[in-house]
Amino acid sequence: LLTIFRSRAVQYGSFTLSSGETSPYYIDLMPCLLDGMALYLLGLEVESSLADVEFSALGGPATGAIPLVASAAIAMFRQGKTVRGFFVRPEDKPHGNRGTIEGRLHPGDRVVLLEDVVTTGRSVLRAVRAVEAAGATAKVSSIHVNAWFGKHDKLSTSLTLLRDAFGIDGT
């Protein structure tokens, strides 16, 4: 999985991130998250890393978390565990149910949040606020590529546990 990430997702140069900060590298996991083998391996990784965590729903910020949630839910189902999935939109939907959360999240749920890449943690913090506003509790964030720019403390104080699968250095 790490080999796939390194060969398909990491680019070096000078990049302006969505936060407005400049970075000497850019991580785009979509080439991995839309690949069958990588998605399969990611689902297994998430399922394995959360085997000791009690939770009832799995979700995260759109769009990066959507394939992670789907692949993890399938891997967990294959192990006999059924979890409900959801994602948090960046903005309220202006039609239909007009909500921020899509999927199945219920008041009282213990939630694991997934994210593909984190730099400032802004989208994960927004997801935490949306989960809490829905009456659920965000207990764990399983982040699959950590590209922090000094914001780790703010995010980790918002969650009970923070797990990274890979750092930018590949560890």
Image (cartoon, rainbow, N blue to C red):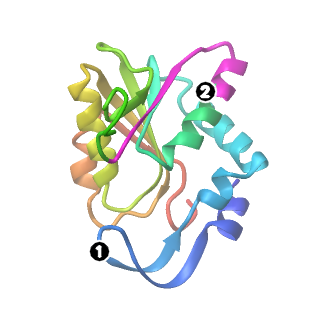
Secondary structure under the numbered disc 1 in the rendered image:
loop
Check disc 2: other Cα within 10 Å, few if <14, some if 14-19, many if 20+: many
Left or right placement of residue 81 versus residue 151 in this view: right
Crowd band around label 1 with a 10 angstrom C-alpha radius: few (<14), some (14–19), many (20+)? few
Image spot of residue 29 (x, y percent): 58, 59
Q: Which residues are magenta?
A: 74-90
Residue 59: quarter of image: top left
Mark 2 highlights which residue? 73
Q: Position of residue 66 (x, y in %)?
A: 53, 41
Q: Which mark is residue 20?
A: 1
Residue 96 occupies which quadrant of the picture?
Answer: top left
Q: Is residue 85 magenta?
A: yes
Q: Amino acid at mark 1?
A: Gly
Q: Measuring 65% from the left and 43% from the top, which residue is drawn there?
A: 42
N-terminal-most mark, 2 or 1: 1
Image quadrant where one finds the C terminus: bottom right
Instruction: Residue at 55%, 82% (x, y): give it.
Output: 12
In the image, 141: left or right of 122? right
Q: Quadrant for residue 15, please give it.
A: bottom left
Can residue 54 be spotted in the picture? no
Number of marks in the image? 2
